[in-house]
Amino acid sequence: MIKLLIGQPGMGKTKEMIEHANNLLKEAKGDIVYIGESNECVLEINHDIRYINIAEYPLDSSNDFIAFLHGLLGSNYDLQRIYLDGILNVYIMTPQEMCDWLDKINAISDKYKVNFEISISINGETPECFKPYMS
């Protein structure tokens, strides 16, 4: 399952995702990973949630990031949920590339039975392919 949090920059998506992650920890049966683009919010995330600053890894493209996720999931079979915060600020994509990227994330979610929550900052129109993942 994928859930998208979409909005303009500065609308509180990160705060909402951190709240979701911290609340999920209370009832989680597996591990939780929170992947962000900086260390700015690391102190707000419960220490039992694995935080990864993606900027610390030499990933040059969204495809490198997909490979990174496969490695992460291959090393921890207990992952229940992965939060992706601001990842699309690091890997700039066209709307079609974002749709293709979401298809890859969805395939990973199905294969490994892990849920994703992804924040996306958009100033314009939301691509049609995002709609199935919006709550």
Image (cartoon, grey):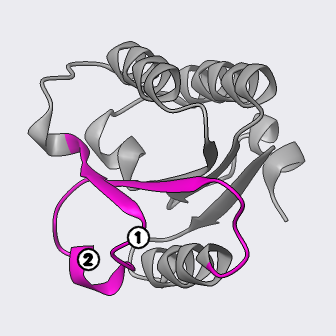
The residue sitting at 31% across, 58% down in the picture is: 51
Instruction: State yes or no: residue 35 in magenta.
Output: yes
The residue sitting at 33% across, 15% down in the picture is: 64
- Say above or below: 104 vs 84: above
Q: Quadrant of the N terminus?
A: top right
Q: Nearer the viewer, residue 27 or 20?
A: 27
Indicate left or right for 11 with 46 as reference. Answer: right
Q: Residues within 10 Å of mark 2 (few under 14, many from 20)?
A: few
Q: Looking at the rendering, which quadrant does residue 9 occupy?
A: bottom left
Q: Earlier in the sequence, mark 2 or mark 1?
A: 2
The residue type indicated by label 2 comes to: Cys
- Say above or below: 47 vs 122: below
Q: Nearer the viewer, residue 128 or 48?
A: 48
Q: What residue is disc 1 on?
A: 48
The residue type indicated by label 1 comes to: Asp
Instruction: State yes or no: residue 36 in magenta.
Output: yes
The residue sitting at 55% across, 85% down in the picture is: 19
Indicate left or right for 61 with 127 as reference. Answer: left
Q: Which span is picked out in magenta? A: 26-54
Q: What residue is disc 2 on?
A: 41
Residue 93's x, y, as percent?
Answer: 42, 29
SS class, disc 1: loop
